[in-house]
Image (tube, rainbow, N blue to C red):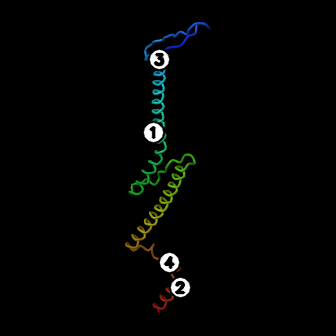
Amino acid sequence: MRLLQPLRVGPGMAPRAVALSFPHAVATASARELATYAALVSVACALLAAFLQVTLLNRMMRPLRTLATAMSGLAGGNADLSARLEVRGKDELAIIAAGFNGFVAKIQGVLSRVRTSSDSVALASGEIRRGTPTCRPAPSSRPARWRKRRHRWKN
């Protein structure tokens, strides 16, 4: 690179010129260093942003994956109805988890009542099959019209 600079030595003298000559690499060295530094900082910031994005996305998706697994188990019939989802915070996912827990609790209660009723029916049918007297209603619990008919038949 060559640079010419005019130089005035005195008021009556003719102007002179000073020539400066240096390699182009020397002139642009600081700009190149600055560009390299800016590129490295940009790459580091992009990597940090990508890492934070993946970390936050995984943290947000974990409760959804847990909910999806629980729903799939419930739909497939392999659900543990005593298990509940963890409810933390007051965000939308916590509201969904609380609603799911309430839903599963109601299903568990209904199935418990059905199981109790079916056990009672099984016990009663076994007693009927054996002909045990515990299944026959007491005379006082029979309707009055049945008692009257029975008395008529005895006469």
Gap between marks 3 and 1 measured at Cα:
43 Å
Q: Is residue 147 above or below residue 26?
A: below
**Mark 2 or 3 closer to N-term?**
3
* Residue labelled with disc 4: 138
Mark with earlier residue (4, 2):
4
* Labelled disc at residue 144: 2
Front residue of 136/40: it is 40
Q: Residue placed at 46% from the left, 48% from the top?
A: 64
* Residue that appears at 48% across and 56% down: 104
Quadrant housing the N terminus: top left
* Residue 123: percent from left, percent from top: 42, 67
**The one of 151 and 14 positioned closer to us in this rendering:** 14
Q: Position of residue 22 (x, y in %)?
A: 45, 13
Q: Measuring 47% from the left and 21% from the top, which residue is drawn there?
A: 33
Q: Amino acid at mark 2?
A: Ala
Neighbor class of circle 4 (other Cα within 10 Å; few <14, some 14-19, many 20+) is few
Residue denoted by label 3: 27
Residue that sits furthest to the bottom in the current view:
155
Q: Which residue is mark 1?
A: 54
Distance CA(mark 2)–CA(mark 1): 78 Å
* Marks 4/2: CA–CA distance: 12 Å
- Foreground: disc 4 or disc 1: 1
Q: Secondary structure at mark 2?
A: helix
Amino acid type at mark 1: Val
Q: Nearer the viewer, mark 2 or mark 3?
A: 3
Which is nearer the N-term, disc 4 or disc 1? Answer: 1
Q: Amino acid at mark 4?
A: Ala
On screen, residue 66 above or below 4: below
Amino acid found under the numbered disc labelled 3: Ala
Label 3, label 4: how many angstroms apart (C-alpha)?
A: 115 Å
Q: Secondary structure at mark 4?
A: loop
